Image (cartoon, helix red, strand yellow):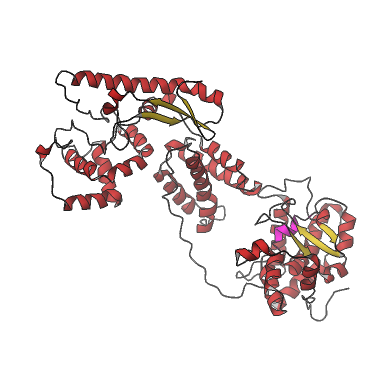
């Protein structure tokens, strides 16, 4: 058995009991006698944990030596040794490093009336630039729990200084339990920059990705955001990141001009710049890899709702413009084959499925199957990103079959239908399937569908939903076909859609009216 090694769940800890006679001279965060040292080693590997133990043993030994020295000083009079200023000799930078690691403990201590009384009495005799006085001042200015407890304290009758309340001295030698004895491990780390123990922010994010919470595309995009933040603050130590750093980063992302000269939208800043940090720090805190979450207190940017100037579905004229143009696309040379296939089929697929454009551009030939006598498109995470990470079977509309969609799929054989897998990574944030959707949107704009109030690909989802309502399609079937979340948990969990039933519902959707002349050979 390895001395001082403890295990909680799968994580190893350094744990050492403080001798009873030394406990009054080694204080906890709340100012109470410390009974033990317990520090997470942030590893689940026993051999790694054993290698980390000696440093913590040395640090606790130093704390014990200091406590014995205090005990010897107190021995002649038999009285307890007066506590010394734990911040003596510390630079303001070292103090801030300690303070950010003890914020939660500090807040807990603040809740005690006795600690509050001691703190105010003791801080009254400090220089205004003393780190502890600055800390108390900042806490009051923030209007947090200190302010509340101070208000309660001022309503109470002050105790007589002769009652023996610690901290009544004005000479700065007595220290309130509020201003806790700093963790020896943290102080030693902060004082020796060369040996400073760090927790990699990139490592925290990678650990979060390993939980499977993110798809590969989002993980890749967010990892880029983490790398940019590391470059911005100039280090990769999650423990040294402050709330002010995250706030500066958010504002930098908001104000920095993009290549087009315009600032980023609030939505982009919140999702692409704040969200990766929130995820990494929250995961680190939950796994006890770090002691504070500097991103938690930084609010997202307020998203201003844009004025709505039109409905979000295509008008009849816009439908005809896009679908007619798609019918006219002809096969060309092999170099442009996939581009032409996208223009020819994806608008029609979106029109008759209401699917997201990237769900269509990532389709593989094997995703088009015949089940129970019906041709279906299986939209599956195996092909690429699906928003809810759940597969769904969408019957192929009879008009698509009449146009030759099934023959085109059979001719393809296997693999992606609308992009060349040899040209890039389909799983990346800007993979070939996503680029295909972006190029299709630009093509639609080039057809004259330029109203900024309409999205050139996504509007098919609104169009299909409106059409489904007009023909009386079952709402649950419509939600399923489009991959929309059900309004009730019971519908989502207990409702199962058969291919026959879905095919019946899809048959309610009429062929799109292309008007006259309609260059539709089918």
- The residue drawn where x is 17% and y is 41% is 121
- The residue drawn where x is 60% and y is 66% is 488
Q: Is residue 288 magenta?
A: no
Q: Is residue 356 magenta?
A: yes
Judge left or right: residue 208 versus residue 195: right
Tally the numbered discs: 0
Compared to 73, does 225 lie above or below? below
Compared to 405, does 513 lie above or below? below
Judge left or right: residue 166 versus residue 348: left
Residue 234 visible in the picture:
no
Looking at the picture, how far across and down is residue 445, in whole percent? 69, 66
The image quadrant that residue 63 belongs to is top left
Looking at the picture, how far across and down is residue 2, in whole percent? 50, 20
- The residue drawn where x is 79% and y is 61% is 377
Compared to 144, does 63 lie above or below? above
Q: In this orientation, which residue lies closer to the viewer: 104 or 136?
A: 104
Quadrant where the C terminus lies? bottom right
As drawn, which residue projects farthest toward the bottom?
516
Q: In this orientation, which residue lies closer to the viewer: 279 or 455?
A: 279
Residue 122 visible in the picture:
yes
The image quadrant that residue 186 belongs to is top left
Q: In the rendered structure, which segment of residues is drawn in magenta?
A: 355-363
Judge left or right: residue 28 versus residue 310: left
Looking at the picture, how far across and down is residue 373, in whole percent? 87, 65
Looking at the picture, how far across and down is residue 119, in whole percent? 21, 41
């Amino acid at each position: 058995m390895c001395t001082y090694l403890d295990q909680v769940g799968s994580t190893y800890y350094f744990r050492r009991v403080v001798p009873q006679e030394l406990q009054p001279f080694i204080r906890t965060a709340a100012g109470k006698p410390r009974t033990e040292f317990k520090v997470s080693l942030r590893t689940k590997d026993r051999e790694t944990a054993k290698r980390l133990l000696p440093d913590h043993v040395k640090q606790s030994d130093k704390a014990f030596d200091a406590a014995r020295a205090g005990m010897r000083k107190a021995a002649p009079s038999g009285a307890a040794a007066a506590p010394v200023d734990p911040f003596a000799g510390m630079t303001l930078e070292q103090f801030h490093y300690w303070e950010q690691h003890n914020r939660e403990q500090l807040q807990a201590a603040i809740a005690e009336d006795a600690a509050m009384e001691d703190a105010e009495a003791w801080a009254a005799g400090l220089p205004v630039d003393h780190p502890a006085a600055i800390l108390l001042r900042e806490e009051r200015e923030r209007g947090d729990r200190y302010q509340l407890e101070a208000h309660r304290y001022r309503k109470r009758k002050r105790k007589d200084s002769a009652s023996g309340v610690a901290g009544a001295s004005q000479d700065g030698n007595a220290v309130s339990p509020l201003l806790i004895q700093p963790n020896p491990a943290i102080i030693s780390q902060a004082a020796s920059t060369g040996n400073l123990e760090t927790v990699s922010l990139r490592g925290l994010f990678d650990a979060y990705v390993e939980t499977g919470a993110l798809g590969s595309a989002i993980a890749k995009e967010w990892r880029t955001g983490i790398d940019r933040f590391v470059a911005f603050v100039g280090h990769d130590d999650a423990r040294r990141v402050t709330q002010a750093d995250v706030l500066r980063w958010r504002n930098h992302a908001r104000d920095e001009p993009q290549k087009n000269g315009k600032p980023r939208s609030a939505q982009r800043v919140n999702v692409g710049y704040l969200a990766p940090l929130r995820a990494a720090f929250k995961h680190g805190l939950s796994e006890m890899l770090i002691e504070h979450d500097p991103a938690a207190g930084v609010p997202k940017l307020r998203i201003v709702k844009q004025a709505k100037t039109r409905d979000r579905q295509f008008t009849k004229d816009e439908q005809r413009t896009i679908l007619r143009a798609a019918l006219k696309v002809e096969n060309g040379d092999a170099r442009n084959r996939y581009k032409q296939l996208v223009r020819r089929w994806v608008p029609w697929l979106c029109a008759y499925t209401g699917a997201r454009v990237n769900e269509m551009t990532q389709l593989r030939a094997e995703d088009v199957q015949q089940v129970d006598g019906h041709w279906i498109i299986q939209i599956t995470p195996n092909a690429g990103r699906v928003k809810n990470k759940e597969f769904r079977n969408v019957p192929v509309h009879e008009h698509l079959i009449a146009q030759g969609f099934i023959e085109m799929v059979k001719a393809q054989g296997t693999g992606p239908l609308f992009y060349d897998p040899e040209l890039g990574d389909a799983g990346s944030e800007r993979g070939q399937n996503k680029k295909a959707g972006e190029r299709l949107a630009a093509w639609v704009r080039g057809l004259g569908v330029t109203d900024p109030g309409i999205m050139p690909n996504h509007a098919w989802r609104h169009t299909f939903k409106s059409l489904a309502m007009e023909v009386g399609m079952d709402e649950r079937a419509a939600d399923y076909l489009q991959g929309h979340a059900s309004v009730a948990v019971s519908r989502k969990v207990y409702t199962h859609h058969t291919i026959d039933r879905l095919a019946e519902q899809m048959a309610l959707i009429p062929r799109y009216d292309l008007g006259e002349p309609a260059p539709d050979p089918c």
